[in-house]
Image (cartoon, grey):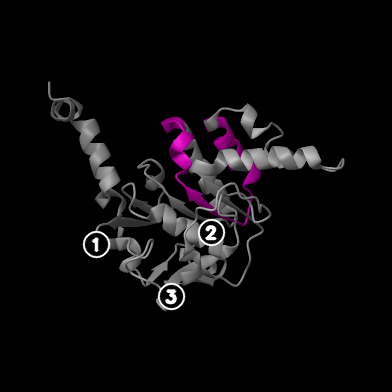
């Protein structure tokens, strides 16, 4: 564990309280209002919570503060189709490890289309050198299904000793592909990579020995996998499907 911490790329974050306004977005969110610091696992950290809880806002701030483009991609991407990210990144301090990652990617489910478009545009402007898309599997992400393009990035672009910040990566993946993603995460973790993932998927959350932070109306807290609301609700529904449907579909 000690060697893992030494190789950790992001160890923790601290919220800078000076000059911010608790009545202003995003500082009014319970997750931000009640957060002073957060430690990350050297391998995998999950951030989970209901829609609108602020998990994507926090993840975006971490990624932008680290140097990633707000809309996603590697640190080399600098395009902008819509300036919609919050100013939270200016109010966090990331405590970094001794070593820098060899690779990295910020994946946002909602803006992957923009990343794919930028790759195609840059390759059209290239002057005979290697194409960017070659490192993504060689086929335009626009020429693949939404799920195939996601998985192509996981398989082809992600590599050893990387920092990967993923916002709802399960959005386009079937349950079987989510299971396959666990295998890919484990391969990359074993080669020195670190993941910070915001997710709704109880399948991904099952990855062992990870930290799970759950957001509620009181703030953020660490929970065990089987204590998380996502796990409990999914298990209850699958164990009592007919009963739940009778409640949900009151005819």
Tell whether 103 sits left or right of 96. right
Q: For the C terminus, which image quadrant?
A: top left
The quarter of the picture where residue 141 lies is: top right
Inspect the magenta stretch and tell me whether residue 130 lies in it: no
Q: Residue furthest right?
A: 128
Question: Residue shown at 24%/31% (left/top)?
Answer: 238
Inspect the magenta stretch and tell me whether residue 174 lies in it: yes
Residue at label 3? 16
Q: CA distance from mark 2 to mark 1?
A: 24 Å
Q: CA distance from mark 2 to mark 3?
A: 16 Å
Residue at label 1? 218
Q: Earlier in the sequence, mark 2 or mark 1?
A: 2
Residues at marks 2 and 1 touching, judged by CB atoms closer than 8 Å: no
Residues at marks 2 and 3 touching, judged by CB atoms closer than 8 Å: no
Q: Is residue 81 visible?
A: yes
Whether 144 is drawn above or below 74: the answer is above
Residues at marks 1 and 3 touching, judged by CB atoms closer than 8 Å: no
Q: Earlier in the sequence, mark 1 or mark 3?
A: 3
Q: Is residue 209 visible?
A: no
Whether 86 is drawn above or below 94: the answer is above
Residue 63 bears which disc, if any? 2
**In the image, residue 180 lies at what x, y percent?**
49, 36
Tell whether 22 sits left or right of 238. right
Residue 177 bears which disc, if any? none
Label 1 Cα neighbours within 10 Å, binned few <14 / some 14-19 / many ≥20:
few
In the foreground, 235 or 142 = 142
Q: CA distance from mark 1 to mark 3?
A: 20 Å
**In the image, residue 233 lies at what x, y percent?**
24, 41
């Amino acid at each position: 564990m000690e060697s893992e911490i030494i190789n950790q790329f992001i160890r923790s974050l601290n919220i800078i309280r000076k000059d911010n306004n608790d009545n202003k977005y995003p500082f009014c969110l319970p997750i931000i209002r009640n957060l002073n610091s957060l430690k990350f696992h050297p391998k995998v950290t999950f951030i989970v919570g209901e829609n609108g809880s602020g998990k994507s806002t926090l993840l975006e701030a971490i990624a932008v503060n680290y140097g990633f483009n707000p809309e996603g991609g590697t640190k080399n991407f600098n395009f902008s189709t819509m300036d919609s990210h919050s100013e939270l990144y200016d109010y966090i301090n990331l405590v970094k490890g001794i070593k820098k990652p060899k690779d990295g990617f910020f994946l946002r489910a909602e803006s992957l289309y923009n990343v794919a478009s930028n790759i195609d545009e840059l390759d059209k402007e290239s002057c005979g050198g290697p194409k960017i898309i070659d490192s993504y599997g060689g086929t335009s992400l626009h020429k693949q299904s939404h799920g195939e393009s996601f998985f192509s990035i996981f398989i082809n672009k992600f590599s050893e000793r990387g920092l990967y910040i993923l916002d709802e990566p399960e959005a386009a993946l079937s349950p079987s592909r989510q299971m396959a993603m666990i295998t890919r995460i484990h391969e990359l973790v074993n080669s020195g990579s670190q993941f910070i993932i915001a997710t709704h998927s109880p399948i991904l959350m099952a990855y062992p020995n990870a930290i799970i932070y759950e957001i509620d109306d009181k703030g953020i807290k660490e929970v065990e996998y089987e204590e998380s609301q996502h796990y409990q609700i999914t298990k209850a529904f699958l164990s009592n499907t007919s009963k739940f449907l009778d409640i949900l579909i009151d005819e």
